[in-house]
Amino acid sequence: MAKKVAVLAVNPVNGCGLFQYLEAFFENGISYKVFAVSDTKDIKTNSGISLTVDDVIANLKGHEDEFDVLVFSCGDAVPVFQQNADKPYNVDLMQVIKTFGDKGKIMIGHCADAMMFDFTGITKGKKVAVHPLAKPAIQNGTATDEKSEIDGNFFTAQDENTIWTMMPQVIKALK
């Protein structure tokens, strides 16, 4: 039976990355729900395209057991995360990531996803692909220079242009 996927979309989100996941899931019959890391379901892509997603991250918190997989879709919100870390939706983001990771669920993402995963401590002992600018921030896991890394339940890509290198393995794991 296909896994049920929770997709996190920061605001603004990298549309190229987000839509690679969503199209692959749709084409392969994998159930997903998109949660905005925001206080509203209305978000934008880095390029300014408006999107209305399924729900907000506050409504995923406490419902992690309803999903088998967490996908973190990176975007331009991440470079300014530190200035907004105290926003309720970013506090929820870190709690949701930690909960999924602590439960050993499948963790997928690209760009700075490994950095966000690492901030919660869930990457300990894992190899992760991460955007070169985020590589120095990895303290718990081991950041590599690979286009993508698959290490146990972690599927990470360096950026939106390398998601495709792990997608066949992602789909296989989710079906």
Image (cartoon, helix red, strand yellow):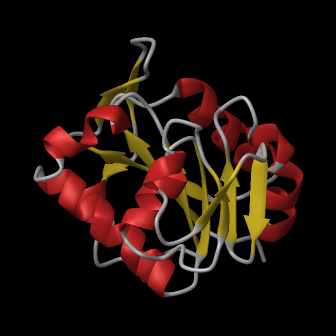
Query: What residue lies at 43% left-to-right and 14% top-to-bottom?
Result: 49
Q: Residue furthest bottom?
A: 103
Query: What residue lies at 81% left-to-right and 39% top-to-bottom?
Result: 164
Place of residue 14 in the rendered image (x, y in percent of width and height, measured from the top left): 50, 28
Specify the quadrant of the image occupied by residue 78: top left
Place of residue 132 in the rendered image (x, y in percent of width and height, measured from the top left): 59, 37
Query: What residue lies at 39% left-to-right and 12% top-to-bottom?
Result: 48
Vertical side of 15 occupied by 143: above or below: below
Vertical side of 128 occupied by 4: above or below: below
Vertical side of 81 occupied by 17: above or below: above
Quadrant (top left, top right, bottom left, bottom right) of the N terminus: bottom right
* 41 relative position to 98: left or right: left
Give the number of callouts.
Answer: 0
* 22 relative position to 1: left or right: left
Query: Is any atom of residue 82 visible in this view?
Result: yes
Place of residue 157 in the rendered image (x, y in percent of width and height, measured from the top left): 69, 47
Vertical side of 57 occupied by 110: above or below: above
Quadrant (top left, top right, bottom left, bottom right) of the C terminus: bottom right
> As rendered, which of 22 and 97 lies closer to the eye?
97
Place of residue 46 in the rendered image (x, y in percent of width and height, measured from the top left): 43, 19
* 153 relative position to 7: left or right: right
> As rendered, which of 88 and 123 lies closer to the eye?
123
Query: What residue lies at 40% left-to-right and 26% top-to-bottom?
Result: 51
> As rendered, which of 65 and 97 lies closer to the eye?
97
* 35 relative position to 105: left or right: left
Specify the quadrant of the image occupied by residue 92: bottom left
> As rendered, which of 81 and 40 lies closer to the eye?
81
Query: Is any atom of residue 7 visible in this view?
Result: no
